[in-house]
Image (cartoon, helix red, strand yellow):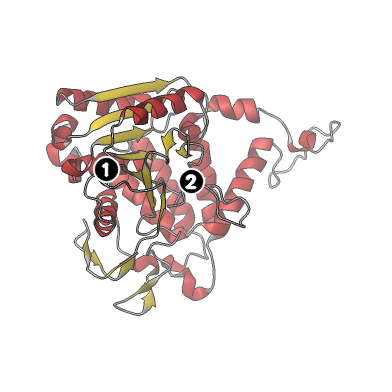
Amino acid sequence: MRFDAALPLQSGASLRDYSLSFETYGELNASRSNAVLICHALNASHHVAGVYAGQAKSEGWWDNMIGPGKALDTNKFFVIGINNLGSCFGSTGPMHTNPDTNQIYGADFPVVTVEDWVDAQARLLDALGIQTLAAVMGGSLGGMQTLSWTLQYPDRVRHALVIASAPNLTAENIAFNEVARRAITTDPDFHGGHFYQHGTVPKRGLRIARMIGHITYLSDDVMNEKFGRQLVAASQGDAERNFFFSTLEAEFQIESYLRYQGDKFAEYFDANTYLLITRALDYFDPARAYGGNLSLALARAKAKFLLVSFTTDWRFSPKRSREIVKALLDNKRDVSYAEINAPHGHDAFLLDDARYISVVSSYFNSIEVVA
């Protein structure tokens, strides 16, 4: 959907003549009371469920959660997925043309924040004629957007499901993001963010950035269970060979796995988008304007909340979700909280843990909609 009116950004800049890609699932009821917005995380998109006809491996990134008869039942709810500004899956981003210069934005695409994304999402919902959302739901960075929705548009959100998220990033998380960004910006093919004009792609930097990310998404338990100290040679049926004795080749299966994930990511993701989205993660901190007092920051929220965390998620640990729970309870808000003992690390919010799916399903079953 295209928007002509300029969107004011938190940075003081603005974006005009931009488009947002979105998908919907289910049907909007007559009272327009059954709409649920799904907010995506770093490398996801508006394609949250289902498959594209005739396209292999096109399953939506939260297809195990959303669809007919699933936890978020599209027989009951009208689900909306929106691709964020600055992303590389259809919405206006760094690879598109700046209408003011007729040149590709590249590194000149304005910095965007979680709050900017929420404002853009609200404009799209306005265009769809949806004033009030039955719920907003997201995991990780999507959970930050969900929380921000309840603060920016408190009268438009009835329920908020914040999954595996946090009220802001720790210094360690910002550090991981910075190392990943430096891997990209120091790639000789980056060209200061204007690599499109040079016909190059900073794939080396993207590979390393993705490898760093994957390390933080998995738990130590999962890494040991899946890979341990197994060698690539053993997986190739060479039981007699112990080591290649090489500093350049992947000798351990975990090395091979990380290289595979990095190679795959570098083929489809945009480097400038990675910089933009990780910076938006860094900036998000609703308590900053309140002297770091999260309880004061969340006083504006009116929605009912479900928060879910996972015990082995060390990047967005349960402690961070409990901070949000406490701040909401300080304001006497209606809050449900589930802490799932799962071994999968941060990636658990995308997986099929039966307890997790049951919690989300039960919560959505409790939401009343008027036909």
Mark 2 secondary-structure assignment? loop
- Badge 1 crowding class, 10 Å Cα cut-off, few under 14, some 14 to 19, many 20 or more, is many
Instruction: Residue at the far top: name it.
Output: 341
Quarter where residue 338 is shown: top left
Instruction: Identify whether 359 is placed above or below 107.
Output: above
Residue 108 placement, left or right of 350: left
Residue closer to the observer: 142 or 254 = 142
Amino acid beneath label 1:
Ser
Point out residue 63 in the picture as x, y percentages from the top left corner: 50, 41
Q: Is residue 240 above or below residue 27?
A: above
| Residue that appears at 21% across and 56% down | 10
Residue plotted at (38% across, 77% down)? 103
Indicate the position of residue 295 as horizontal and vertical percent values.
Answer: 16, 29
Quadrant showing the C terminus: top left
Name which residue lies at 49% across and 35% down.
Answer: 347
Residue at (30% x, 59% y) in the render: 111
What's the CA distance linking mark 1 and mark 2? Answer: 21 Å
Is 265 drawn above or below residue 13 in the view shown? above
Mark number displayed over residue 33: 1
Q: Nearer the viewer, mark 1 or mark 2?
A: 1
Q: Which residue is mark 2?
A: 49
Q: Residues within 10 Å of mark 2 (few under 14, many from 20)?
A: many
